[in-house]
Amino acid sequence: MHCCGHSAQCAALLGLAAALTEPHILDNMCGKIRLCAVPAEELIEIEYRKNLIAEGKISYMGGKPEFLKRGLFDGVDMAFMVHTTIAETYVVKKAFSVGCVAKKITFKGRSSHAGGSPWNGINALYAANLGLNAANALRETFKEQNYIRFHPIITAGGNAVNAIPDRVVIESYVRGISYEAIKDANERINRALTGAALSMGANVDIEDSPGYSPVNNNHMLADVAVKAYNEIFPDGKIVVSNVVGTGSTDMGDLSTIMPILHPYANGSTGFSHGSNYKVENVQTACVDSAKWQLAMLDVLLRDNGAEAKNILDNFTPYFKSKEEYFEYMDSFSRSGDRIEYSDNGASVKL
């Protein structure tokens, strides 16, 4: 069993867990608990992480996939965590958050004097702009139920104002509610990016890498969370929601091979990922969150672990093993120039 939370929550958990050392509390309980603080949950700085992979320091860009690869989740049967939120405390009993493929896109042109001889150059920035506009033109072709998101940023756009940019780097994700939806949207976007480069006589290296898997909450663990919350906070309020989130998290990767739960605890203010986001109520976001997680452990492990065993007996994983999971995720990896120019024209590799 794995409990994954933010550092403040882990500190609160460690303090409250001392109560479980009392012998009478441990009577009739069965199971082991593994507290785990996972770095790199936010999949950002793609180029930096790809360099770490090239150097052999990591194998995957997400925290939990990397931990899976290193065997740190071996022997773990199920996992849960609690995330802070600006909304009410809530839990979703089904698939609720999208997965993604991570993209590093490098448009390649030819530099030249921007004022004196621009005709000798190939403007990689113009090619990139065309590519982003072409991708934007695809948005109406994405089905609403697939929750597709494409939100690129330019991390390198030229070196000098009087030189035609010969290299432009873009980072983005393609998000979707399922692997099939992600692959379909990603192929469309790659066509748009490649076509834009071709129209300018430029080239484009599209490096696709495994991002995160869609999150599938276990409905039985969700019931445990509601029961535990009501036991420890009889006057509190917990909402069972059907909202589909269009953010992504590496808890999704764990959900493909074990029962997981990713509920939310009230206590933050501001906009998610905004500069004004902060934990306003430490009691509800950290301390009450830790109490809630301990109560969940109690429900799962009491009666010789009857509830935990019941959940495992009724769980069918998406992948039979972590090896099967990695084999599938690695199928997203692809890189290289997508256009080959010759005297007879050009050939495209999508």
Image (cartoon, rainbow, N blue to C red):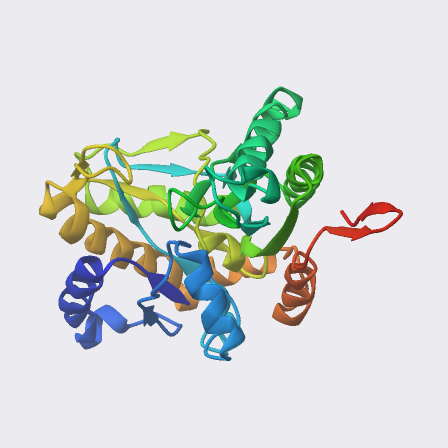
- On the image, the x and y values in percent for residue 262 come to 39, 48
Asked if residue 272 shows in the view, the reply is: yes
Q: Is residue 243 above or below residue 110?
A: above
- Kindly give the residue lying farthest to the front in the view shown: 116
In the visual, does 83 lie left or right of 66? left
Q: Is residue 326 above or below residue 124?
A: below
- On the image, the x and y values in percent for residue 30 come to 39, 72
- On the image, the x and y values in percent for residue 311 come to 52, 56
Q: Is residue 249 above or below residue 313?
A: above
In the visual, does 134 lie left or right of 92? right
Q: Residue at x 44, y 65 (%)?
A: 49
Q: Nearer the viewer, residue 33 or 256?
A: 256
> On the image, which quarter does residue 87 sit in?
top left
Q: Nearer the viewer, residue 256 or 141?
A: 141
In the visual, does 345 lie left or right of 241? right
Q: Nearer the viewer, residue 20 or 190?
A: 190
> On the image, which quarter does residue 90 sit in?
top left
Q: Nearer the viewer, residue 314 or 319?
A: 319
Give the tally of numbered discs. 0
The N terminus is located in which quarter? Answer: bottom left
- Kindly give the residue lying farthest to the top in the view shown: 140
Q: Residue at x 26, y 59 (%)?
A: 294
- On the image, the x and y values in percent for residue 335 come to 66, 59
Asked if residue 62 shows in the view, the reply is: no
